[in-house]
Image (cartoon, grey):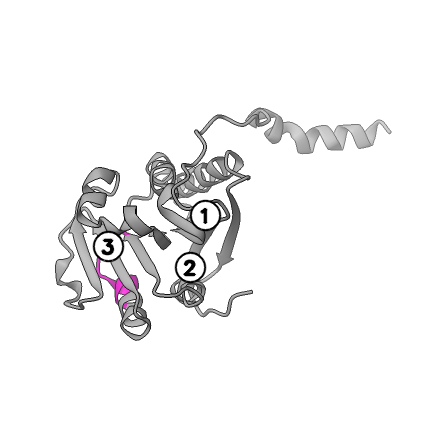
Amino acid sequence: MYKFLNHIDLMIDFISTKEKPIILEFGVERGSSTKKFIAFAEKNDAKIYSVDINDCSGVSNSDKWKFLQSDDLEIDNVIRNFNEIEKVGVDLIYIDSYHEDKHVQKLLSLYFKYVKKNGAIFVDDVDNLYFRKNKDTWNSIVYDLTIDAIKEFYFNNTDKCSLRIIYDADENGLAMLHKKDDFGNDANKIQKIWNYNFLIRLFYPYMRMISKIFK
């Protein structure tokens, strides 16, 4: 559906279909994604709002970009500084700040209502293949928990959004929640969805082998 060379290109391809789009970015760091968003904004009359816990204000002096140094979970502070988000909503939210499952899920629940209908939330770094290849247990678990948290949010909001996960060996995965609900409507409250016991998953291959032997 989308033509892209990397995750940023995919998001820009998505946002290019919107009129005077507004982008909300969580996590700036060195500004690699921010600068590409800004380059797009300057050619397409878009606006970029970025939030980071660290001071990244030196990334750009573009009048299409506004930066706030803040914890992105402090939504009242974010809305107070970027009040256009509350008034008209955003077309795209890009989450690339603190890669921890509960943090990501809270961001989804807090900011979902501010995404316009047919807008999207993208979450970076959801595939742990790189860490598994390097036998990095801790980061493999962190990435698994993150994608599980995104899926849990989606399972509770199937009436409000769709979920796509893009796996790419050159990047660490990207999740896309495409909103089909109206701007201003809250996400559903997260409730635990039934899942099978993890121990059953471990023993299932052996149970299958045993059942085949006795057939």
How packed mark 3 is, by other alpha carbons closer than 10 Å (few <14, some 14-19, many 20 or more), is: many
Q: Which residues are magenta?
A: 26-35
Check disc 3 and give the amino acid type.
Ser
Magenta highlight on residue 30:
yes
The residue labelled by disc 2 is 171
Question: Callout 1: helix, strand or loop?
Answer: helix
Residue at 27% from the left image edge and 64% from the top image edge: 32
Residues at circles 2 and 3 in contact by the CB criterion of under 8 Å: no
Q: Earlier in the sequence, mark 2 or mark 3?
A: 3
Which numbered tag is attached to residue 132?
1
Which numbered tag is attached to residue 50?
3
Q: Earlier in the sequence, mark 1 or mark 3?
A: 3
Residues at circles 1 and 2 in contact by the CB criterion of under 8 Å: no
Residue at 42% from the left image edge and 66% from the top image edge: 6
How packed mark 1 is, by other alpha carbons closer than 10 Å (few <14, some 14-19, many 20 or more), is: some
Question: Callout 2: helix, strand or loop?
Answer: strand
Query: Residue 95: x percent and y percent?
Result: 34, 49
Question: Is residue 17 in sight in this rendering?
Answer: yes
Which quadrant of the figure contains the N terminus? bottom right
- Distance, label 1 to label 2, CA atoms, is 14 Å
- Distance, label 1 to label 3, CA atoms, is 31 Å
Q: 210 or 95: nearer the eye? A: 95
Residue at 21% from the left image edge and 38% from the top image edge: 76
Which quadrant of the figure contains the C terminus? top right
Q: Residue furthest right?
A: 215
Image height of 34 relative to 182, above or below: below
